[in-house]
Amino acid sequence: MVDFSLTDEQMNLIEEIRAMGPELEKKSLEIDAAGDDHFDYSLVTQLAEQNLLTPIVPVRFGGRGFDYFTTALFIEEIGAICTGLAAVLCFNSHVGSIINMVGNEEQKETYLTLLTEKTPRLAAVALTESGAGSDVGAMTTTATFKDGKYLINGTKDYMINGAIADLTVCFAVLDPIRGRSTMVTFIVPGQAEGLEVGTLRNKMGLRYALTHEMIFRDVQVDPKNIIGDVGNGYMVVTQAIDRDKVMVGAAGVGLARSAYNKALAFAKERRQFGRSILENQAIAFEFAQMLAAIEAARMLVWKACWLIDHNADFTLASSFAKIAGTSVAQSVVSKAVDIVGGRAFLKGHPLEKLYRDAKFLSTAEGTNHIQKAIIASLL
Ligand SMILES: Cc1cc2nc3c(=O)[nH]c(=O)nc-3n(C[C@H](O)[C@H](O)[C@H](O)COP(=O)(O)OP(=O)(O)OC[C@H]3O[C@@H](n4cnc5c(N)ncnc54)[C@H](O)[C@@H]3O)c2cc1C
């Protein structure tokens, strides 16, 4: 049975985040204007105090025990406030769900518990390399077994939280020639010796999310920090991305909703030719179309989460949700900028930031081209 009603707990969660919204959004605009070369802990501290940094962690490891559906509701709310913050939370969630899905009890006890501490704990994913973007199997970061430990060597790029992470999930291959069939998933503690901060990635948008190239130079990892089996890293990463890309869709729905609301408030107030611009049918119809598109994308996100939470096949649904949520973000924010006009083009206007932030979403967690390739492979 499908049920679209939200529980009291879910409604309370939404209210809780909406109450924090104006303050967090104001701060995120200031952070965006200041550039993306430092990390402001105030936003994540506020969430950590309410155990909302990695809420997907099960209750028995100290988390809030959110299912994917509730996580998507949460990420939509955060996406409506700050896309960079949503991205930080998505990577925490990504790491939390990998450990929860594939990790053993000891790893869960140690690392999931860490992610729920009141001191904000941040997690990073070391997957992408300069020669391995969509084609992660082409990675050249190696793990070599020596004297009872693995030594990781290589350079990972675009790592959100990379320079400030308390733990990193790193993917490396035992043999670059045999590639993905030798891929291994490692948990690397944040301050591991040999883990160096490389070039800062100055970005068009998403400035809240501190992003770096990270260099692994003989980083020693104990075999007990391997998640899953040696050689099944590719399966781990694809299964995790299949789920977590839905959260990128949810963030997109939130961004679209925020852009819609800002433009609507403006259109009601702005008077030209003796009436509000919303009184022009051309403008009102734009809002009608945007609202329908946002709702359609949200339903695809909800459906994908429902399938994940009910252990049903979600492959197509998660690709639909990712494409729909991220596309609606870009199309709605573009229309919102058109409707607000010149003001929205000025630096410091919230829509100007949302417009730049929206561009990230189609690239994240498997580009939208890759989503279409997944769908096409199932035709
Ligand atoms: C701000 C930001 C933060 C990021 N954070 C992280 C992070 O924390 N950790 C991490 O590991 N990575 C991270 N990434 C990397 C991100 O996951 C990659 O950018 C993404 O996977 C795409 O890889 P690429 O940029 O190398 O593009 P490429 O894979 O080189 O793709 C280039 C273009 O070709 C298209 N393309 C590629 N292959 C195909 C195909 N088979 N069919 C059709 N089209 C195709 C793509 O869709 C794209 O349009 C981040 C990226 C950004 C921009």
Image (cartoon, rainbow, N blue to C red):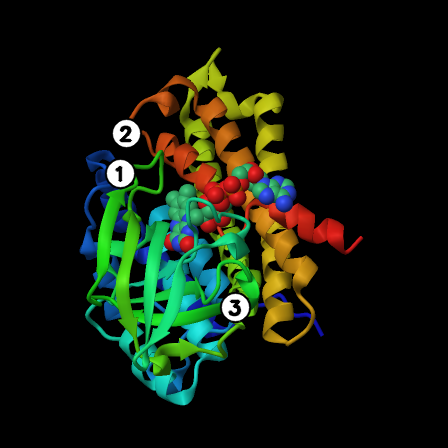
Q: Residues within 10 Å of mark 2 (few under 14, many from 20)?
A: some
Q: Residue at x 23, y 34 (%)?
A: 33
Question: What label does residue 348 carry, if any?
Answer: 2
Question: What label does residue 220 carry, if any?
Answer: none
Cβ–Cβ below 8 Å for labels 1 and 3?
A: no
Q: Residue at x 42, y 62 (%)?
A: 14
Between marks 1 and 2 in the image, the one whose residue lies nearer the viewer: 1
Q: Give the mark nearer the N terminus: 1 vs 3.
A: 1
Cβ–Cβ below 8 Å for labels 1 and 2?
A: no
Which residue appears farthest toward the top when viewing the image?
A: 273
Amino acid on which disc 3 is placed: Thr
Left or right, residue 313 beside residue 128: right
Q: Examine the rendering and report whether any part of residue 55 can be seen.
A: no
Question: What label does residue 32 carry, if any?
Answer: 1
Q: Residue at x 21, y 39 (%)?
A: 30
Counting labels gives 3
Amino acid on which disc 1 is placed: Asp
Amino acid on which disc 2 is placed: Gly
> How far apart, in angstroms, are the residues tagged by discs 2 and 3?
47 Å
What percent of the width, then of the height, locates residue 348? 28, 29
Q: Residues within 10 Å of mark 1 (few under 14, many from 20)?
A: some
Say above or below: 264 vs 273: below
Between marks 2 and 3 in the image, the one whose residue lies nearer the viewer: 3
Question: What label does residue 182 carry, if any?
Answer: 3
Q: Examine the rendering and report whether any part of residue 66 can be seen.
A: yes
Looking at the rendered structure, the secondary structure element under dot 1 is helix
